[in-house]
Image (cartoon, rainbow, N blue to C red):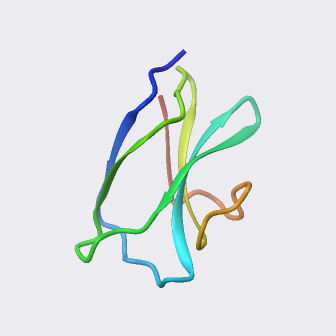
Amino acid sequence: MGEPGTSFALGGFETLPSDRNYQLWAMRDDDAISLGVFNTDDEGNWAGDMDVPLEHGDQIALTEEVAGGSSEPTMEPLISTQI
């Protein structure tokens, strides 16, 4: 099992309008677990901590969603990686 408080840093993304957010997901065993929502700063960067423990084999994905986030991803990931 992973440790809580995993830190993330992303760059190179456009700042979204106020009715949209980026949402980070952990994809595990066919489940999408929301890690949180955010928007970037004026330079297109964001960094933060997520409270959900990550596990070896999780796929981390980033989508664009409505402000406040979604209960599951509504689009193909903008980026993804497996840990």
Q: Which residue is drawn at 47% across and 84% down?
A: 17
Q: Residue at x 45, y 79 (%)?
A: 16
Q: Position of residue 45 (x, y in %)?
A: 28, 63
Q: In which quarter of the image is the N terminus?
A: top right
**Residue most extreme to the top:** 1
Q: Where is residue 35 in the image (x, y as percent from the top left)?
A: 55, 45
- Answer above or below: position of 22 versus 47: below
**Residue most extreme to the left:** 43
Q: Residue at x 62, y 63 (%)?
A: 69
Q: Where is residue 50 in the image (x, y as percent from the top left)?
A: 45, 41
Left or right of 21? Residue 13 is left
Task: Write down the quadrant of residue 11 in the picture.
Answer: bottom left
Left or right of 48? Residue 76 is right
**Numbered label tally:** 0
Q: Position of residue 25 (x, y in %)?
A: 58, 46
- Answer above or below: position of 57 versus 65: above
Q: Which residue is drawn at 56% across and 82% down?
A: 19
